[in-house]
Amino acid sequence: MAKNPKDRYQTAEALKIDLPHFLMDEPIAWPKLSSTERLMTWWRREPAFVSHLLGIGSALAILLVSSDSWYPPLRIGLLLGWIVGSWILQRIANIQRRREAAHLSWLAFDIVIFTLLMSLAESPRGLLLIGYPMMICACGMFYRVRYAVIATMLSVVGFLVLCATVTDQINSRIDFAVIYVSGLALVGFCLISMIHRVRTLTDY
């Protein structure tokens, strides 16, 4: 169906040979994709993992270049573990009967690792806390209300655990913590409402 005839299968036999490989997520002989097209195909096929890889990879690069604290080895280890864990969960999510459990486990894994990283971060952590609402918003790509609910609840719990275990400006005033938790709840509520509307329109 490519616009350029040269980019299409030349015979039905060639398509027949490639089709079983495509269905098994194995390499195919045609079409010959450029590096950019391969990246875009990978993005469409595994958007959650590619997003994780880009985000965590960026954080890892920044940490390697800019940090001079004695914490980096542990933080680098956590970031690498986050990438490996995400890869494993993506492989599990590719199995249809295990997809739901893999996605829910992935949500919990992300928030646990992020909370651990925040506990190791240097004060002040203010701007870094954008990670919790980002993870709530990111779960919207699955278009499941329960995912947004669970992500919001886990983010609130993660933030409260962080407040209880570190000394920082984030927990120096209770009103700031209340405002932040209220913001997380509002982000979650807005996302839930959007997903509900989209799914209702789809069903209609």
Image: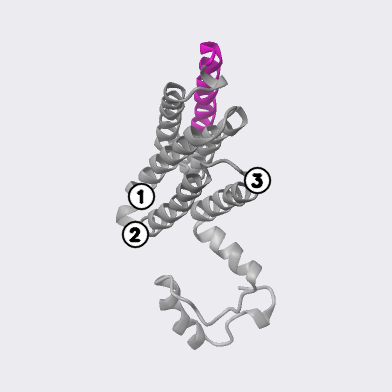
- Of helix, strand and loop, which mostly describes the magenta segment? helix
Q: Earlier in the sequence, mark 1 or mark 2?
A: 2
Q: Label for residue 21?
A: none
> Residue 60's spot in the image, x, y percent?
57, 50
Classed neighbour count for the residue bearing mark 1: other residues with Cα under 10 Å, few (<14), some (14–19), many (≥20): many
Of circles 1 and 2, which is in front?
1
Q: Earlier in the sequence, mark 3 or mark 1?
A: 3
Marks 1/2 in contact by CB < 8 Å: the verdict is yes
> Residue 112's spot in the image, x, y percent?
41, 38
Q: Quadrant of residue 173?
A: top right
**Kind of residue sitting beneath label 1:** Ala
Instruction: Please state the extent of the stretch shown in magenta in the rendering.
Output: 172-193
Q: Which residue is mark 1?
A: 102
Query: Who is closer to the viewer here, 160 or 38?
Result: 160
Marks 3/1 in contact by CB < 8 Å: the verdict is no
Of circles 3 and 2, which is in front?
3
**Kind of residue sitting beneath label 3:** Ser
Q: Is residue 179 left or right of residue 107?
A: right
Magenta run includes residue 99: no
Q: Which residue is mark 3?
A: 66
Query: Who is closer to the viewer here, 193 or 68?
Result: 68
- At numbered mark 2, what does the secondary structure look like: helix, strand or loop? loop
- At numbered mark 1, what does the secondary structure look like: helix, strand or loop? helix
How is the rendered protein coloured? one colour
Q: Residue at x 37, y 43 (%)?
A: 104
How far apart in space, not on screen, are marks 3 and 2 (Cα)? 39 Å
Q: Which residue is mark 2?
A: 95
How far apart in space, not on screen, are marks 3 and 1 (Cα)? 34 Å
> Residue 168's spot in the image, x, y percent?
54, 22
